[in-house]
Every structure is written in C-alpha cells, then in structure tokens.
Image (spheres, helix red, strand yellow):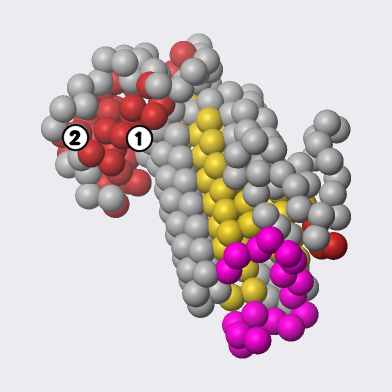
C-alpha cells in the first residue's frame, strides 16, 4: 500500500485515487468518488455518505452498493480532520483544486466549492450551494441551502448566510449584511486599481447585480466570475449595510 495512505483508512468500492494522494487514519471514503492528484485528506474525514434527503436511498456503499451522483475532490485540495462531505443527488458534490476544507466542516449534497476557496472550521453548507473560487468562509458560519456565494467573498465568523452574495464582497452579521468590497483580495490577485475602483463604484451605486459594470478590459477570469453571477437565475442578494439608517 502507498505509505501516504494509512492502513487504518477505509477506501471503498467505486473510489478512484489519483497520484500522490494522502489519506489519514480513520478516514472513510465511499464511492462513487474521485480524488484527484496530490489531494490531502486528514484523519477521521468522512467523504461519500448518501445525501441527507428522505427521497434518496441510504445505501451501504462500503459493501459495494454504489448509488448517487458522486463526490470529486480536486487536485491539491486539503480536507482536514473530521470534515464531512456527502454524495451529490444529481451532480457531483465537488471541492475545487487547491481548496481547503478545514476541520469539522460540513458540505451537504450537490455543493460546489470553487478553486482555492477556504471553508473554515465548523462551517456548515446546505445542499445545492455554490461557493465561488477563492471565497473565504469564516469559522462556524452556516450557509442555507441553495445559496450562492460569489468568487472572492469574505464571510465573517459565525455568520448565518441565508441570501446570495455577489462576487468580491465582505459580509457578516445577523441578519446578514454586505459591508463593502474585498479590495484586499482583489489587490492580492493583481487586479489593477482602476478595475477595483469600477467594482467599488458599481456596488456603491446600488447595483448589486453588477449589470452596469463594463467587463471590457477586465482580466478574463474576473469577467467570468462576474458573468457567472449575472447569469445565475433567481438572484437574491443580501442587503448592503449602507441601506440601513
């Protein structure tokens, strides 16, 4: 056996492991599941249990009874101790390349986590949520099912997230409110000052849907992130703090 994989881990039928995968003792990985190259899975992580849905089969995947839409752990992703990731019901529950899922975090069925995102310790994410690339969700936040959190968002510790967050904003509080733009995150990825200023101005004008923002001249990746938000159906963004008296 590969020395990177503890003999005390359980890797069930229907699990495909890439090269140089690390799996700690007590981890359980149930199929269908794909773990891509260089992923790191900590002790006691639980990956691939059935969706927590009353209309879904609660199958015994450890005995070869494979069902559901699968889990995918992207290349170089880190899944820390005690994290729980459930099978998808109609699409793979997925963790993007280079993302970090910290200890005791919970990803329900059909959740999509973008590349380089961080889901901090104790965070719970309900079914069908989409979390954008490089988003950072603070410790013990709770994300309601079907919520969208855009790329580059910063979510404060303990925040109950029950509405969508457009890309590159900071959000916290109960009730959830948007508190400006994550300009530091944009600067760290090398975004030009004029582009950052345009994003700040769009949000400050009240355009939380970013429909007035000119995407020409923006880096392609940033334009794609904003387009993803624009094209999302039934957008329901959280209120900005500056709308309050």
The residue sitting at 40% across, 21% down in the picture is 231
- Which numbered disc flags the more N-terminal residue, 1 or 2? 2
Q: Position of residue 160 (x, y in %)?
A: 66, 33
Decide if residue 158 is in sight here.
no
Residue 134 higher or lower than 236, as above or below: below
Question: Circle 1 is placed at which residue position?
Answer: 225
Q: Which mark is residue 10?
A: none
- The answer to which quarter of the image holds residue 52 is top right
Q: Nearer the viewer, residue 144 or 187?
A: 144
Left or right: where does residue 11 sit relative to residue 161? right
Q: Main secondary structure of the magenta part?
A: loop
Residue at disc 2, secondary structure: loop
Q: Position of residue 168 (x, y in %)?
A: 38, 36
Residue 96 higher or lower than 168, as above or below: below
The residue sitting at 27% across, 33% down in the picture is 223
Decide if residue 133 is in sight here.
yes
Q: Position of residue 212 (x, y in %)?
A: 26, 15
Find the magenta span and give its range: 1-17
Q: Is residue 237 magenta?
A: no
CA distance for labels 1 and 2: 11 Å
Residue at disc 1, secondary structure: helix
Q: Is residue 14 magenta?
A: yes
Q: Nearer the viewer, residue 129 or 123?
A: 129
How crowded pointer 2 is (Cα within 10 Å; few <14, some 14-19, many 20+) is rated as: some
Tell me whether circle 1 and circle 2 mark residues in contact (CB < 8 Å).
no
Left or right: where does residue 2 sit relative to residue 187? right
The residue sitting at 37% across, 14% down in the picture is 206
Question: Circle 2 is placed at which residue position?
Answer: 218
Q: Position of residue 95 (x, y in %)?
A: 54, 52
Q: Nearer the viewer, residue 113 or 201?
A: 113
Q: Nearer the viewer, residue 225 or 203?
A: 225
């Amino acid at each position: 056996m590969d020395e990177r994989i503890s003999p005390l881990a359980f890797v069930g039928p229907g699990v495909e492991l890439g090269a140089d995968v690390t799996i700690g003792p007590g981890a359980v990985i149930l199929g269908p599941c794909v773990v891509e190259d260089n992923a790191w899975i900590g002790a006691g992580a639980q990956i691939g249990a059935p969706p927590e849905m009353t209309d879904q089969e609660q199958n015994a995947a450890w005995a070869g009874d494979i069902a559901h839409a699968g889990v995918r752990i992207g290349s170089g992703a880190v899944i820390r101790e005690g994290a729980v990731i459930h099978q998808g019901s109609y699409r793979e529950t997925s963790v993007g390349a280079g993302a970090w899922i910290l200890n005791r975090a919970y990803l329900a069925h059909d959740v999509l986590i973008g590349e380089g995102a961080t889901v901090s310790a104790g965070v719970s994410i309900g079914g069908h949520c989409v979390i954008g690339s490089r988003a950072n969700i603070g410790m013990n936040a709770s994300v309601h099912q079907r919520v969208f959190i855009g790329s580059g968002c910063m979510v404060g510790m303990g925040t109950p997230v029950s509405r969508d967050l457009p890309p590159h904003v900071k959000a916290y509080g109960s009730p959830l409110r948007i508190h400006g733009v994550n300009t530091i995150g944009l600067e760290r990825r090398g975004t030009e000052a004029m582009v950052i200023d345009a994003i700040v101005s769009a949000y400050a004008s009240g355009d939380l849907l970013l429909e007035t923002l000119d995407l020409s001249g923006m880096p392609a990746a940033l334009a794609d992130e904003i387009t993803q938000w624009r094209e999302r159906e039934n957008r329901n963004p959280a209120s900005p703090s500056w709308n309050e008296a």
